[in-house]
Amino acid sequence: MSNQIIPYGRQEITPEDIQTVIETLQSDFLTQGPKITEFEEAFAKYTESNYAVAVSNGTAALHLAVMALGVREDEYVICTPITFAASINCVKYCGGQVLFADIDPETYLMDIKSVKLLIKNNPDKKIRGIIPVDFAGRVPQLDAYRKLADEHGLWIIEDACHAPGGFFTDQNGERQLAGNGKFAELSIFSFHPVKHIATGEGGMITTNNEKLYKHLLTLRTHGITRNTAVFENSIEFAVGNSHAGDEYPLWYMEMQELGYNYRLTDFQAALGISQLKRADLNLIKRRAIAELYTNAFSHVPGIIHSSGITEGHAYHLFVLEVEDRKGLYDFLRSNGIFAQIHYIPVHLMPYYRKQGWKEGDFPMAERYYSRCISIPMFPSMTEEEINYVISITKLFYERS
Ligand SMILES: *Cc1c(COP(=O)(O)O)cnc(C)c1O
């Protein structure tokens, strides 16, 4: 094969997707129309949560989530260093402080033991929240996090960008879907093209908390409300120079706090609705690829550990931990396979180093980074492409 490049992830746009976007472009609404609510309702249903709020991207979702739950200048939020920087930057946007906890080398998720230790060892710090990340598509034991959070009065934001449709099994043996609102106050998703559902840019927040839901709707659009029941200014003021009635005029609205324009457009929502219909089928395809990879790589010298097979894993990524990672990366690339590294530990990004973090702070995360590589994983991969990735990867270790 391949003069064609195989990326680590790729969106799939079908003729139906295109048709539905065209129809929305020809409708009366490009933004703030009916497709937004339709997408939100479909997504809430998909995640088995009560409410969903569509926003312009996953980072905006994180920003609004932290705003809604609150963090003060002297308060700390705990996150994993093995994630996309946006997972924790949102705390900085809101003026809060960051703490990192090391990962579990088996699951690659933030290690709850390390979180507990962090809380125990920092009695002088006001810890306000935890942001567990469903890294690579694996959903953490959020019931255990809820218990811990309740013990210490903390909020939880689940960064579920990698895991729509993924689940974990709770202590009672029940399946709990990513973003179902039962454990985290808020869960956030991204619809960037490399994620499971693509809308170009796009994001979603899910919750079971009605008050937070309503607050997020306001924050998404400048902090403006049209709900007469909560208006602060008088009817007399709102009416102006004509004879004041006993109702607020139809044009009247109030900006009651500082919000943003983090809205999604209707044509993006239309694309999201169409993509969501294939989400379950695509999860099955991702899982089948993970099984082929796991079988193929389980006895290859030089391949140390992998994402493997776990129930409920949504397989946004399939990670290998390998010897000579740079050698493999270059060899794959010279053969048209564009692997990627997820992630360079956030605490070692220059921005965070300047705030005091250094190498050696989180040994498991740093060892993981030194040898991880994400190989291609997307539902539209052909059998030929999957086999090609397997044979080129094996060839590298058999040849050297
Ligand atoms: C993609 C991603 C984000 C940010 O989403 P955007 O839509 O790109 O802003 C946040 N967290 C994780 C884990 C992600 O993978």
Image (tube, rainbow, N blue to C red):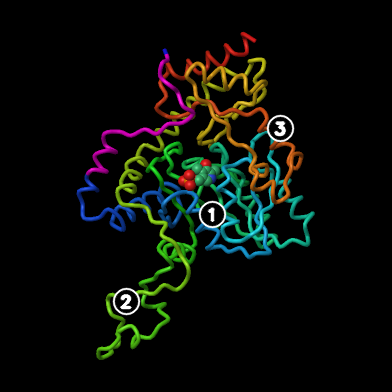
Residue at 55 percent of width and 36 percent of height: 136
At which x and y percent is residue 11? 40, 34
Quadrant in the picture for the N terminus: top left
Residue type at mark 3 is Arg
Sequence-wise, which precedes: disc 2 or disc 3? 2
Q: Can you tell me whether the CB of the residue at mark 3 lies under 8 Å from the nearest atom of ligand 1?
A: no
Q: Is residue 310 magenta?
A: no
Q: Is residue 161 among the parts visible in the rendering? A: no
200 and 146: which one is in front?
200
Residue behind mark 1: 182
Q: Secondary structure at mark 1?
A: loop
Marks 3 and 1, how far apart at CA? 33 Å
Sequence-wise, which precedes: disc 3 or disc 1? 1
Above or below, 253 relative to 163? below
Q: Residue furthest bottom?
A: 243
At which x and y percent is residue 76? 67, 58
Residue at 23 percent of width and 43 percent of height: 22
Residue at 53 percent of width and 38 percent of height: 137
Foreground tag (3 vs 1): 3
Residue behind mark 2: 252
Q: Secondary structure at mark 3?
A: helix
Magenta stretch? 2-22
At which x and y percent is residue 245? 27, 88
Q: Secondary structure at mark 2?
A: loop
Instruction: Categorize mark 3 by other alpha carbons within 10 Å: few (<14), some (14-19), many (20+).
Output: few
16 and 30: which one is in front?
30
Residue behind mark 3: 367
48 and 72: which one is in front?
72
